[in-house]
Image (cartoon, rainbow, N blue to C red):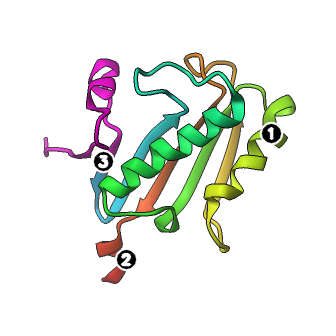
Amino acid sequence: MTTRDVVFPPGRQALYERNRYSPAIRSNGFLFVSGQVGSREDGSPEPDLQTQVRRAFDNLNAILKAAGSTFDDIVDVTVFMVNPASQFEAIWQVVPEYWGEAPHPTLTAVGVTWLYGFDFEIKVIAKLPEAAKG
């Protein structure tokens, strides 16, 4: 088995080790980012929904930065929401703060029943900048 090229953002490695997953893996010119939630440094959920969404994007951006990427490099987004019928509008008020300019990446939004105490999660696939040049 080949060794995974794991990307860790600064200051959160203990959280990923405790939960036994990699925040992101570089592979074949792409960055595959695990779902990011609006967790505080200790891993607990941010109680305010919009602040939780901002933290999820901030956590995502920390991983992208550690890999030398930005949100502009993202080609595919999947978001998970615990209660999309009542929370979608509040979440989508925050998203444009991070989304970047059009054209936007592809998006799949999924309603779920449980996110480990969180209300929102975002996972992405990004083209690594050095791969985009070639």
**Alpha-carbon distance for marks 3 and 2?**
17 Å
Q: Mark 1 or mark 3, which has the lower sequence index?
A: 3
Q: Which mark is residue 103?
A: none
Name the image quarter holding residue 16.
top left
The three-letter code of the residue at mark 3 reads Ile
**Alpha-carbon distance for marks 1 and 3?**
31 Å
Instruction: Give the residue number, with chain letter if any, for mark 2.
Output: 132
Between residue 52 and residue 7, name the one nearer to us. Answer: 52
The three-letter code of the residue at mark 2 reads Ala
Q: Mark 1 or mark 2, which has the lower sequence index?
A: 1
* Quarter occupied by the N terminus: top left
The three-letter code of the residue at mark 1 reads Ala
Specify the segment rendered in magenta. Answer: 1-25
Q: How many marks?
A: 3
Whether residue 47 is visible: yes
Whether residue 122 is visible: no
Q: Mark 3 or mark 2, which has the lower sequence index?
A: 3
Closer to the camera: disc 1 or disc 2? 1
**Alpha-carbon distance for marks 1 and 2?**
34 Å
Q: Residue at x 31, y 73 (%)?
A: 131
Element type at mark 1: helix
Between residue 102 and residue 57, name the one nearer to us. Answer: 57
Number of residues whose C-alpha sits closer than 10 Å to that of mark 3, classed few (under 14), some (14–19) or many (20 or more): some
Name the image quarter holding residue 87.
top right
Instruction: Give the residue number, with chain letter if any, for mark 3.
Output: 25
Instruction: Give the residue number, with chain letter if any, for mark 1.
Output: 90
Element type at mark 2: helix
Q: Residue at x 66, y 74 (%)?
A: 103
* Relative image position of residue 64 (x, y in whole percent): 39, 55
Between residue 67 and residue 3, name the one nearer to us. Answer: 67
Q: Residue at x 67, y 48 (%)?
A: 108
Q: Do the CB atoms of the residues marked 3 and 2 lie less than 8 Å apart?
A: no
